[in-house]
Amino acid sequence: MNEECGVFAGILFDKNENIIDKTIKSLSSIQHRGIQSCGVCISYCGYNQMLFKDSGLVSNVFNFHKKKDFNGNMAIGHVRYSTVNGDLRENAQPLKIKFKNDYLYLVHNGHIPNVLVIKNELSKTAKFETQTDSEVILIKIISEFEKNNLDISFENIGKVLSTFFDKGAYCLCFLYKDKIFAFRDKFGFRPLWFCQTNDGFFVASEDIAFKDFNIDKKIEIMPGFGVELDLNNFEIKKFDYSHKKKMCVFEHIYFSHINSNIFNYNIFEQRKKFGEIIAKKNIKLKNRCDIVVPVVNSGICAAISVSKVLNLPLNFAILKNKKQNRTFIEVENLRHKKIEQKFKIKKELIKNKKIILVDDSMVRGTTAKNLVGNLYKAGAKEIHMLIASPMLINTCLFGVDIRDQNELIASKYKNVKNLSKELGLTSLCFIDLFDIKNIYPKDEYCFDCFL
Ligand code: 5GP
Ligand code: MG
């Protein structure tokens, strides 16, 4: 499973320029999408491909020494988010497969639900080396091409994807000889961007990946579309004609970077809007509370709006240990320990205060449980928690990475009063599903995790 991974691809016009620096910069900018492993494949106009991938963060894996090994003007790259079981080094991407006399390389962000059926069928003739959906995509493409005597092209890959992977979520970038092909599935669950700069063409999961580039043109690839790149041209093309948009609202709530623009919305503005909705629902707290405290970093945008709407001071009384990454994906016993180390509370800002605590979402409730206890210890008189999204009561194959509904604290307690009591809060409030749906065009977004 690779639901929140990040992908990157690029070509520099000048064959003698090296793309490794831009690749590493871009991958670092989308590091929040996956911290387990990362990798790149670099090639010189389609020749001398060099593939390297490993567990760890981009800055560690591609440190100064490693960077020196790479030279080429074409690249694809990946940052990987994996579930606990999928945390094996061999699952790192890019993946590669031999086709005729060359290799086809792939990076993938998404999840294919019917993957086992296809995998079983392929297992009769093919050998799998990873536990990823991505490898099944790669092997299926090649097996179809061999069976039907087809060559690698945008259209041929698109046909296999829209025929056999029509139930899945995928943003894919392929590198083959001197071409790059990128695809976004018809649902558009995950984001994908293209840009042209003064020195090349680039594709990435989020436009934050292009932040240091000299951009001439920036285009969000729409669901069912892809882009074909070579040294001279880019062409955005449709490959799937069904209209089934199901863009994941959690990209707006949590996954994407605050400075990205996703599905035609600016993430910062969108999260502020969620904050506004939850604040307006809680106007009564204006005269009762003293300060608004964001859960760093995920609650900051919403907290800005809450503070503004309620006219209460925004107080960064919770600090985050800089070294700590996203704790959400840690194994059970480690998660609690890590969350203890993740936050530091500034007691002097909390003592004797009635506080409004703001976060983007509540999943297992680990964050809330930890913070509430420690905020009371720090002297808080009351804690009113505002969550800038609806109650997460359902598992979704394409959204938040939880497979067992029992793990979702909102599903366990169902009503907000009980949940609030369980967490030891003075009050608790979520956005109503109706209110969040209302700000989006009808039938274009996926809200399944709230249903
Ligand atoms: P909880 O602590 O309630 O289990 O999870 C909520 C916290 O985890 C929130 O602060 C939110 O920012 C973050 N979060 C929500 N969904 C996800 C997800 O799918 N993956 C990761 N890594 N973090 C998440
Ligand atoms: Mg968080």
Image (cartoon, rainbow, N blue to C red):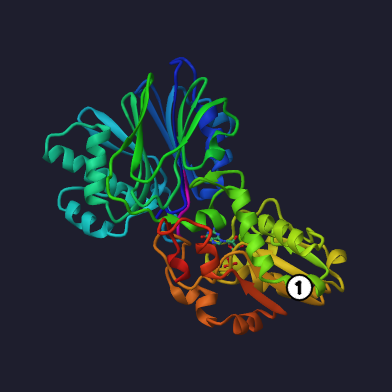
- State the residue at coordinates (87%, 74%): 352
What is the x, y in percent for residue 415? 56, 82
What is the x, y in percent for residue 108? 38, 45
Secondary structure mostly taken by the magenta-highlighted segment of the chain: loop
Answer with left or right where residue 130 lies relative to residue 15.
left
Position of the N terminus, as image quadrant, is bottom left
Which region of the structure is painted magenta?
Answer: 79-83
Q: Is residue 440 above or below residue 431?
A: above
Q: Quadrant of residue 64?
A: top right
- Ligand 1 quadrant? bottom right
Name the residue type under label 1. Answer: Leu
Q: Is residue 398 above or below residue 284?
A: above
Position of the C terminus, as image quadrant, is bottom left
402 is within the stretch colored magenta: no
Answer with left or right where residue 307 lies relative to residue 171.
right
- Compare residues 430 and 31 and report the one nearer the observer: 430
Q: Is residue 416 above or below residue 58?
A: below
What is the x, y in percent for residue 273? 62, 57
Q: Is residue 89 above or below residue 28?
A: below
Residue that mark 1 sits on: 285
Q: Is mark 1 within 8 Å of ligand 1?
A: no
